[in-house]
Image (tube, rainbow, N blue to C red):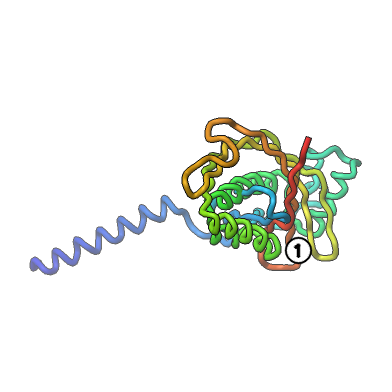
Amino acid sequence: MSSNDFITLFFLVAAVLIFFQLRSVLGRRTGNEKPPRDLYTPRDAAGQEPADAGKVVTLPRRDGNGEEEDRFAAIDAFAPAGTPLNEALRAMNKADPSFTPKEFLNGAKMAYEMIVMAFADGDRKTLKNLLSPEVYDGFDAAIADREAKGEKVKSTFVGIDKAEITNAEVKGSEAQMTLRISSQLISATYDKDEKLIDGNAEDVAEVNDIWTFARDTRSRDPNWKLVATESEHE
């Protein structure tokens, strides 16, 4: 065997080994993979906002072979059967069989942090992917006003204390979910001279928001978008 043949054989063996290693790590596609999670959108630019530039919450797909009551089992575990919320969530599942409240809530909390931090950082690209056009316009205007004044916001997201679904409804083909979110945030706003003009760079503040997410159940796009935000005052 010539040296050239040996080198060719060596690289061929290496390529095969690499292929099988990658296959073992990444797995095989079966056609039933869960789509990536995405995000949402706010209502009022006066609110605050939060992390994978995406859009909304992407829900896991199901095989559709289960009985209806099996699909409702997760909803009954989340909200007592017979309650208005349970009935609303059941209606949501009928409109979109891939919907589960637990998965939705997990995605919504992730979206919340992403939007809050993107707003503080003036990250328009992330916000545009997460917010409805109307909400984005409000956020964009607030960021532009900040920039015109030379102000900067420095924020640290501490965490979410509580997040709960307060309402769910289907209006035509549009599904809407409303959540009450209580979070902790450190936020301070400085003017162009680096002088503190709002907030506190050390104190943790409690923030209470009510956010509404929506998606078209007829759309092939599985992502929800945050369509409304408002601050809840004690």
Q: Is residue 233 above or below residue 225?
A: above
Q: Is residue 53 visible?
A: no
The answer to which quarter of the image holds residue 186 is top right
From the viewer's perspective, is residue 63 above or below residue 83? below
Q: Hey, what amino acid is under mark 1? A: Thr
Question: Relative to the observer, which residue lies in front, 35 or 141?
Answer: 141
Residue 100: where, in percent of width, then height?
73, 48
Secondary structure beneath label 1:
loop
How packed mark 1 is, by other alpha carbons closer than 10 Å (few <14, some 14-19, many 20 or more), is: some
Q: Is residue 147 visible?
A: yes
Q: Residue at x 77, y 38 (%)?
A: 233
The residue singled out by tag 1 in the image is: 217
Using residue 133 as the reference point, say whether residue 174 is left or right of it: right
At horizontal 32% and vertical 56% (from top left) the residue drawn is: 18
| x 72%, y 54%: residue | 44
Residue 193, how many percent across, how many down?
47, 46
